Structure formats: structure tokens, C-alpha cells
Amino acid sequence: AGDERGLPYGRRGAREERERERERNARMDVGAMATTRGGLLAAEWLTSLIMFSTMSSAGHHGDTARQYVVAIGVIMWLLTSALAASYLLTLQHDLPTIHLDHQGPVLQITGKLSIELVYYALFSFLSLVAFFCAAAHAHGSGAAAASAFFGVVLAAATGASCVLTYRDLADDLSGGPQLNPGQPASVSQPSQF
């Protein structure tokens, strides 16, 4: 073995190479996937992969409901892969967070909203819609029925991840998104008769 110029490593070069390898390994946190959120993320990755692959093998490529199931499955598979990479590389704490402070006359919204929470809330709904599309358009196809099953498992896992992410945000000092009812518009600004 040698360096990029083909020269053999000396004692110092080998030590530096071992230190660089330790730094690379220290940045990977496999234990992050051993948590509840990591397990749910792995389940979402696997079920989205199975959901879109079984639906794409079911045929009838002109059916838009089946195309929707495949599209949602592929998008979720890619996004969960990116989230899993951010967990493994300990970058999940660097994901953007939006601070909310809306004081409307009817509804006040305060707190923090993470991109991860938005992803889980949006895709738990979209995967539930994909389940209904797969179930309604199975037409006796075993592969489409399997896709519908994995669609409902995916919706449940994504919904559970949404709840866990919301609880983690709410446990922080500023809390997660808080919706507080205000006064009805007719009471907050009475008419001048």
C-alpha cells in the first residue's frame, strides 16, 4: 500500500491514514437506526420498496391509480433513503427547522416545525391515499393486493413516525407546533352599530 503518488507509507503516513479512517467511522452512527425512530424509518424504507415494486409488477401500466401508487412508493423510498443516510451520518439534527409565530384572530400557531415532521405528515396522508388506490384497483391481482397491504403498513409506520417526531419537537424548550383557538372573528372585532 502507498499514498496517491505510489510511495510507500512510512510510520507517520500509516498513522495518519488510520486516524482518517477512525474519523470516517466516528461520523457514522449505526446506533441511530437501533432506536424506535430508526426502526420505523427502516420499516418505511422496506415497505415503500415492496409497495412500488409489487404494484409495478402487477401490470396495467395505463391505470393512473396504479401509477400513483408506484410514484408515491418510489418518492418515499428515495426520501427515506436520504433520511436514513442523514441518521447514519448524524446529520438529522442539522435538518432545517421553521420557527412559527402566527397570531391570527381565530387561530394562533407557535412553536417549531421541522422538515422531517412536514415530510411525515404529508406522506402519511399520501401513502394512505396510495393504499386506497391500490385496494380499489387491485381487480383480482395478487401483486396489487400485496401492494395495498404494504401501503397500509407504510401509512401506519409513517403516521407513527409523525407522532414521534412531533413529540420530540414538543419536548424541546420551545415546543412543537401549538394550535390555540382564539376568539371568533365576530367577537374579536365587534361591529359599530
Image: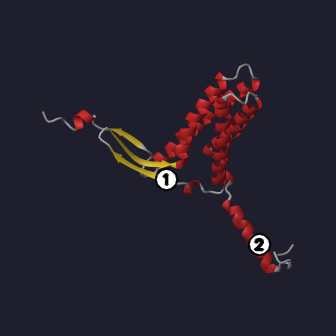
Tell which residue pokes out farthest to the front in this image.
62
Q: Secondary structure at mark 2?
A: helix
| Residue placed under numbered mark 1 in the picture | 97
Kindly indicate the quadrant of the structure image that contains residue 65.
top right
> Disc 2 residue type?
Glu
Instruction: Judge from the rendering whether residue 8 lies leftward or rightward of residue 97; answer left or right.
Output: right
Q: Residue at x 67, y 47 (%)?
A: 81
Q: Residue 187: x and y, percent?
A: 22, 34
Tell which residue pokes out farthest to the top in this image.
140
Q: Nearer the viewer, mark 1 or mark 2?
A: 1
Instruction: Judge from the rendering whether residue 58 lies leftward or rightward of residue 93; answer left or right.
Output: right
Q: In front here: 78 or 93?
A: 78
Q: Secondary structure at mark 1?
A: strand
> Disc 1 residue type?
Thr
User: Relative to residue 116, is residue 24 depicted above or below?
Assistant: below
Give the class, few, some or many, for how many residues have Cα within 10 Å of label 1's Cα (few <14, many ≥20).
few
Q: In front here: 92 or 191?
A: 191
| Residue placed under numbered mark 2 in the picture | 17
